[in-house]
Amino acid sequence: MVGIDRRTGARLSNFESALQAVEYILGTRLGSVILLREFGGGVVELLGRLLTADLFLAWCQLVATAIDEWEPRFKVRRVYFSGSVEEIRSGIAKILIEVDYRPKGHLGDFTVQTVATLGVNANGSVVSQ
């Protein structure tokens, strides 16, 4: 399967298309897609709040649930922060998502091709680590 970059129109590989889908899912507010009100990640609504242990756990759960629900080519293994305590406090820690990549998941074939780690950048983009 080949996808299309939503910004440039360039061709994307299946894996790049799945990354773009995760970026769109996590950046979409719940209720903002007119004909599919339940679509989105729910994580945007948590931005700007004081980071507590409960909020961190809720955020991790929302990310995992949204990806598992809306992107069948990925199955989330875990969501975690990478960095020291000081980096996390100052807001420069990396957010990492470990997933099983299932290239034909959208076709009902859930065979895992590889395990990948995705990084969420400060600008909201999702990249493979």
Image (cartoon, rainbow, N blue to C red):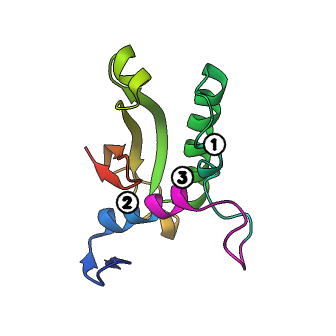
Pinpoint residue 78: horizontal percent, then vertical percent: 47, 33
According to the picture, the residue beneath numbered tag 2 turns out to be: 19
Q: Earlier in the sequence, mark 3 or mark 2?
A: 2
Nearest the eye: 71 or 121:
121
Q: Are marks 3 and 2 in contact (CB under 8 Å)?
A: no
* Local SS, label 2: helix
Vertical order, 88 against 20 (above or below): above
Determine whether label 2 and label 1 are within 8 Å by CB.
no
Which stretch appears magenta? Answer: 22-36
Q: Residues within 10 Å of mark 3 (few under 14, many from 20)?
A: many
Residue 34: x %, y % from top left:
71, 78
**Image-quadrant location for residue 25:** bottom right
Please, what is the three-letter code of the amino acid marked with disc 2? Leu
Q: Residue at x 31, y 62 (%)?
A: 15
> Is residue 98 found left or right of 11 in the rendered image?
right
Q: Amino acid at mark 1?
A: Leu
Q: Is residue 122 magenta?
A: no
Under tag 1, what secondary structure? helix
| Residues at circles 1 and 3 in contact by the CB criterion of under 8 Å | no
Which residue is labeled 3 in the image? Answer: 67
From the viewer's side, name the closer residue of 39 and 77: 39
Residue to which mark 1 is pinned: 46
**What is the CA distance from the residue labelled 1 to the residue labelled 3?**
17 Å
Q: Alpha-carbon distance for marks 3 and 2? A: 10 Å
Nearer the N terminus, badge 2 or badge 1? 2
Residue 116 vs 33, above or below: the answer is: above
**Residue 58 marker:** none
Task: Tell me which residue sits at (59%, 37%) in the image.
Answer: 59
Q: Nearer the viewer, residue 12 or 86?
A: 86
